[in-house]
Image (cartoon, grey):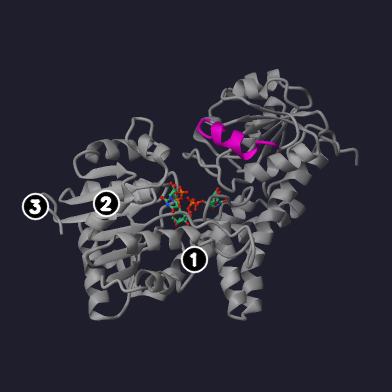
Amino acid sequence: MSDNKFVKKIACIGAGYVGGPTMTVIANFCPDYQVTVLDISQERIDRWNSDDLPIFEPGLKERVLKARGQNLFFSTDIDRCIDEADIIFVAVNTPTKTFGEGAGKAVDLQFIEQTARRIKENSKSDKIVVEKSTIPVRAAETLGKILHSGNNSVHFEILSNPEFMAEGTGIHDMENPDRILIGSMDTPSGRAARDELIKIYERWVPRENLVTTNLWSSELSKLVSNAFLAQRISSINSISGLCEATEADVDEVARAVGKDSRIGPKFLRAGLGFGGSCFRKDILSLVYLCEHFGLQPVADFWEQVIIMNDYQMERFVQRILSAMFNSVVDKKIALFGFSFKPDTGDTRDSPAIHISKMLLKERARLCITDPHALKNAQKDLEGVEGEIVYEPDPYKAAEGAHAIALMTEWDQYKTLDYKRIFNSMEKPAFLFDGRNHLDHQALFDLGFNVYSIGKPDRTQFNDPS
Ligand code: UDX
Ligand code: UDX
């Protein structure tokens, strides 16, 4: 199958946030493997082949440049590359269904199915097919049925190898993973396929971090990992409301609670709620699965994580309203940050989208600033009624504003000249820190009325009591 130059040929279908960086890291560590990343979008592939990569991820560009044209290739020639590949990763998108049965919860598997059909049609030799996309548990069964349908004598061995990369640290996460999870069938061919994947990862991952399970455990573990992470965020956010009511400080509570080694300190940062392409989608998928299997109380338990996340955003907007004398009509609000977290231009399911829409409904005038996400912000808010200005310079964004609302904890927002910003704003000047990112005492000392998450307000107004 493989020509002399390379030990094996890998193809990856889907050149997105997952496929692109994952394959780049594999290509870097395995120069003797040919890695081709494929996509139906010519525009996306052209960008992967240019200096202007389609995604922004620290460390990605250097690694792409190191391997591109050597053993890393980006192409739309899907059919030929399927035929030539020994191992095919599937990293197409798996959004939440927006129509029909399961709309709003179930995963839309149409791209997975189309990809499976394409693999089947173009394969003349046996292949290992690796599920990289997050999919519902037992999706490999469907994949297998499609791949082995008809009179095709080619054998496909399906593996589950979910990604655990967080955006912004994707390259670091892939190069230093807590674990690499590989699920396979417990058959001789299943174990052999699993060992092929282990051969790749063991180039840089310590053996004890390579976790092998059966297929279904692997598929389910991905959903459960994301559900547990999101659940921690909703848990601490639920406590932030109680802190605001009682003058406790949520960061102090998180520190005290997280010191218990059984609980641990990570993912206890209270804020506006979680965003990103995975958490909401994966929990909804889990909820749908539980309902499907008749486990309604389990479904309700996990759905509550999302309900709490939505409530946190609503609560933030309510707080803005009540602080600003119950109206933001015609008031300029500068939104600092729009991406769902820093160090990425990705805005998928960003709390900033939901909060912008709520503030526009209240007829505020928005000026949105972000170092990397303005183009995406513009797409997200296209057609939404109300006044929105997109301004890359945070100083200009804040000029004449009644309030600043910090949506994303970009590092550079810590070191802005807030005195200059304060002087350019309408008074009283409000600052709502949705990520507890700034120095609240210093801002208060400059004259701001400061509101943060799960902490007492710092206002300049005299208490009439
Ligand atoms: C996606 C899923 O959202 C996530 O659940 C899963 O874990 C991995 O895949 P991501 O890489 O972030 O994550 O998605 P996206 O950036 O949208 O990339 C998917 C790519 O697949 C797109 O470039 C799209 O053009 C491509 N695609 C989609 C195909 O090449 N063929 C298809 O049939 C469908
Ligand atoms: C997540 C998982 O971490 C990763 O393992 C999986 O593969 C994909 O989904 P990602 O969505 O890129 O990664 O980012 P993550 O760092 O997990 O943050 C998700 C959201 O949670 C962000 O909006 C972030 O601001 C928020 N968050 C995170 C909090 O609000 N508080 C925290 O303590 C941590």
The amino acid pointed to by label 1 is Leu
**314, 49: nearer the viewer:** 49
> How far from the left and from the top, in percent, is residue 301?
64, 71
Looking at the image, residue 194 sits to the left or right of residue 222; the answer is left
Q: SS of the residue at dot 2? A: helix
For the question of whether residue 256 can be seen, the reply is no
Q: Magenta span has 376?
A: yes
Question: What residue is disc 3 on?
Answer: 4
Looking at the picture, does residue 377 appear above or below residue 249? above
> How far from the left and from the top, in percent, is residue 370?
56, 31
Checking the image for residue 287, the label placed there is none
Label whose residue precedes the other's in the sequence (3 or 2): 3
The amino acid pointed to by label 2 is Arg
Asked if marks 3 and 2 touch (Cβ < 8 Å), the reply is no
Looking at the image, residue 393 sits to the left or right of residue 44; the answer is right
Question: What residue is disc 1 on?
Answer: 223
Label whose residue precedes the other's in the sequence (1 or 2): 2
Instruction: Judge depth for marks 3 and 2 and give the one in front.
Output: 2
Magenta-highlighted residues: 371-383
Q: Where, by quadrant of the figure, is residue 205 drawn?
A: bottom left
- Using a 10 Å C-alpha cutoff, classify the residue at mark 2 as few (fewer than 14 neighbours), some (14 to 19) or many (20 or more): few
Q: Residue at x 58, y 52 (%)?
A: 274
